[in-house]
Image (spheres, rainbow, N blue to C red):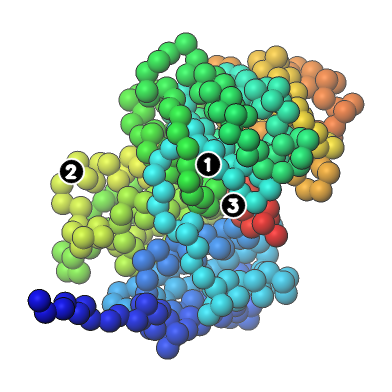
Amino acid sequence: MAKVCWPYFDPEYENMSVRMNPPRVSVDNTSCTECTVVKVDSVNKPGILLEVVQILTDLDLIITKAYVSSDGGWFMDVFHVTDQQGKKITDGKTIDYIERALGPKGHTTDGMKTSPGKRVGVHSVGNHTAIELIGRDRPGLLSEISAVLANLHINVAAAEVWTHNRRIACVLYVNDDNTSGAVDDPNRLSIMEEQLKHILRGCEDDDKVARTSFSMGFTHVDRRLHQMLFADRDYEGGGVTTEVDYPSSFKPKITVERCEEKGYSVVSVRCKDRAKLMFDIVCTLTDMQYVVFHANISSSGPYASQEYFIRHMDGCTLDTEGEKERVSKCLEAAIHRRVSEGLSLELCAKDRVGLLSEVTRILRENGLSVRRAGVSTVGEQAVNVFYVRDAYGNPVDSKTIEALRKEIGHTMMLDVKKDPASAKAPEAEASGWAKTSFFFGNLLEKFLA
């Protein structure tokens, strides 16, 4: 019998075009008086726009304008960026990092790949174990979750918590208090998983409330939270969201139209500007399997205007009303997940097991509900930020704030900031979204450093 010989393909062939035409990155502080201009030219590849935007937003840079073009085999992008104070990027280390990360030595990580949406997952990352949880939100839930971990002598080194449409998604990085390493004992993991599942389920057995499974991979934290809530279909609020949750001034205006001349679908978004807005939109479009060919991003005062020319990965445009409506709902959900409503409480204290449990218990006992949270550990110091409202979704009154100061102030530093969405402070509303960034999209890199 004749032997079948398959043609040989060089495994490095796919990277040949990148090696022959390496990315070119320019960080320009002279051509614009108000912003730093970052230009990226490279061979086009799937996910490259999200990769670039992710790197810039992880540095907490504010993208005020952007022009994207990726027709054919080439990607050309121009970003106008500032720091959190609205100033140019002058720090040499930051500029060097941008040039290295986006240039020829940069690389696309597995974090660019879409991972399945998990309900409760546990996997090891360096000296930490990453836990993913999603379920139905209720007052005091974060306190109950942190109490379970504290009782198991598990320390929370970092975490991010988002709530939207009565759903809660968490990514927590924990370690064993005794070994200061990852929690890798199968019995402890099983106990922790079962107890967390019980807390998330509450009194109901519906699969929509919570599920348990193990996650084998890791993605960028912010993107993972978007993926978890998207898989949980939080965009189908079913009328749950109230005007107290999202005032009309925050409601995005999203349209999806067809560009007959070029064969694109055009997604237009106009909403309040804030940090990481472009990342949230590009992340959602990418995870919905859409490709951005052109984009025009700008901000005027407190508002942002973003326009994306897209097609599905199979080359099709959005032709049905159902598709258009789904994209609009998903983008609106992506925009609202990170909205910083509520009073901002920033706490700093020496890190220890049970600290998060203690703080969230005090918040619960004072009738406060956590809408969004970020936890980080720097050396021996724990830095926690909570956006809170009362149990009914209303702003926190001054008496509650004073009670918190008396109860917490003697053991840890407490900084209380006004609600950036308050109608009584229009100037703060205009700038608060863009300057209340505390999330840690590069947590994995910090842990592995």
Q: Are marks 2 and 1 in contact (CB under 8 Å)?
A: no
Of mark 2 and mark 1, the one earlier in the sequence is 2
Q: Position of residue 410 (x, y in %)?
A: 89, 26
> Mark 1 packing: few (<14 Cα in 10 Å), some, or many (20+)?
many
Label of residue 338 in the image: 1
Of mark 3 and mark 1, the one earlier in the sequence is 1
Circle 3 or circle 2, nearest the eye? 3
Q: Position of residue 80 (x, y in %)?
A: 54, 68
Residue lying farthest right?
Answer: 410
Q: Is residue 93 above or below residue 281?
A: below
The residue drawn where x is 30% and y is 46% is 327
* Residue pointed to by mark 3: 441
The residue drawn where x is 22% and y is 45% is 323
Label of residue 321 in the image: 2
Quarter where residue 176 is shown: top right
- Quadrant (top left, top right, bottom left, bottom right) of the N terminus: bottom left
Three-letter code, disc 1: Arg
195 vs 14, left or right, is: right
- Quadrant (top left, top right, bottom left, bottom right) of the C terminus: bottom right
